[in-house]
């Protein structure tokens, strides 16, 4: 999260191709492609690029700067939530998205898309809320006005610091942070200090708010054993959005089963072979439950305990299992001719 005393026009650095190549290469090697991480990458990048077809829908950066004074004064939720998806320039965007690419893939692969999306939404609100609370507290108790209460900041790094805390919460090894070897579970704190040293205009309060939000989130997860309400909402939204696709898929699949529902020829036990499947006692062909006549030999579906009655043929037999081999072959030819 970068901050400035006044709104500033973004610059260009030609680094977006690097982000694109890294993302494609990383996703290409994965057997399962994490969709939520890809969606977050796309959302942040599109907001920065502002393509013509989206430009009228995307608020200008001057309307969404995270400014504690303006948020509290006007109860501006747009600034509170949307400021995380805006970046000042390409280096700012690319650095944050490369970090999101790595953290997002690891977390989403391990916990699933629904839980990951729920966690990101929660950490977004918590990191912004903690930052707002810190700025207000410094203003009220220490009269820190210009330094934090009136600063303007944007960027996804507050959420990224929170994700870093969650990712490394159980780690017992060491990591290198800008060349400094530290315990991995404290890597976020080391990065907080080092980033502020190398990039003085970075939002210290925004990064600190992300770390505290990550710690608070982990404590809440450990103390609460019930179902995640945010995950339930995310799952419900996902089901609502994908319902048309699932409905069409079920219709196509159902029609395909009715039209081309072929079983397999087996030599196992006669009777029911599985849900919606019955096994012909004459030729042991597995038929769809929708069929009343064997698709292989034309024998009727089982009745009683092991007998099958022929239907729709000139001859009648008390037991289709007594059919001679030549007669069975003739019935098969008639069936499929």
Image (cartoon, rainbow, N blue to C red):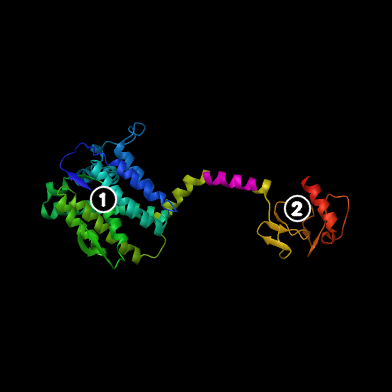
Q: Is residue 20 above or below residue 268?
A: above
The structure residue drawn at horizontal position 36% and vertical position 43%, both measured from the top left corner, is 42
- Which residue occupies the extreme right position in the image? 315
Which quadrant would the C terminus be assigned to in this image?
top right
Q: Is residue 297 above or below residue 16?
A: below
Element carrying mark 1:
helix
The disc placed on residue 296 is: 2
Q: Is residue 260 magenta?
A: no
Q: Which is more toward the observer, 60 or 141?
A: 60
Question: Does residue 191 show up?
Answer: yes
User: In the visual, does 257 lie left or right of 173?
Assistant: right
Disc 1 crowd, CA 10 A, few/some/many (<14, 14-19, 20+): many
Element carrying mark 2:
loop
Question: Does residue 228 show up?
Answer: no
Query: What separation in Å lies between label 2 and label 1 (alpha carbons)?
Result: 64 Å
Q: In which quarter of the image is residue 307?
A: bottom right
The structure residue drawn at horizontal position 33% and vertical position 53%, both measured from the top left corner, is 102
Q: Give the range drawn in magenta.
A: 245-256
- Which residue occupies the extreme left position in the image? 143
The disc placed on residue 157 is: 1
Q: Is the magenta stretch mostly helix, strand or loop?
A: helix
User: In the visual, does 11 lie left or right of 220?
Assistant: left
Q: Where is residue 22 in the image (x, y as percent from the top left)?
A: 33, 47
Q: Earlier in the sequence, mark 2 or mark 1?
A: 1
């Amino acid at each position: 999260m970068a901050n400035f005393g006044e709104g500033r026009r973004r610059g260009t650095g030609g680094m977006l191709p690097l982000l694109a190549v890294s993302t494609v290469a990383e996703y290409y090697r994965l057997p399962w492609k994490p969709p939520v991480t890809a969606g977050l990458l796309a959302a942040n990048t599109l907001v920065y690029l502002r393509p013509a077809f989206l430009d009228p829908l995307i608020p200008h950066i001057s309307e969404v700067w995270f400014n504690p004074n303006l948020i509290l004064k006007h109860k501006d939720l747009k600034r509170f939530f949307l400021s995380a998806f805006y970046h000042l320039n390409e280096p700012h965007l690319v650095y944050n998205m490369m970090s999101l690419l790595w953290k997002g893939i690891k977390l989403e692969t391990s916990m699933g898309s629904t839980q990951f999306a729920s966690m990101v939404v929660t950490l977004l609100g918590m990191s912004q809320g903690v930052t707002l609370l810190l700025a207000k507290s410094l203003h009220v108790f220490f009269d820190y006005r210009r330094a934090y209460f009136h600063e303007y900041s944007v960027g996804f790094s507050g959420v990224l610091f929170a994700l870093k805390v969650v990712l490394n919460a159980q780690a017992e090894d060491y990591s290198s942070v800008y060349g400094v070897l530290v315990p991995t579970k404290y890597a976020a704190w080391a990065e907080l200090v080092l980033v502020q040293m190398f990039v003085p205009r970075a939002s210290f309060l925004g990064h600190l708010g992300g770390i505290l939000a990550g710690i608070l989130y982990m404590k809440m997860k450990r103390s609460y054993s019930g179902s995640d309400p945010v995950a339930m909402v995310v799952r419900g939204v996902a089901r609502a959005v994908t319902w048309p696709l699932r409905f069409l898929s079920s219709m196509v699949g159902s029609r395909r089963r009715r039209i081309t529902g072929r079983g397999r020829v087996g030599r196992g036990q006669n009777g029911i072979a599985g849900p919606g499947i019955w096994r012909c006692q004459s030729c042991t062909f597995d038929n769809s439950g929708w069929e009343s006549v064997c698709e292989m030999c034309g024998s009727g579906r089982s009745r009683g305990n092991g007998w099958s009655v022929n239907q729709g043929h000139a001859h009648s037999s008390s037991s289709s299992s007594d059919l001679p081999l030549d007669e069975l072959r003739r019935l098969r030819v008639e069936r499929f001719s």
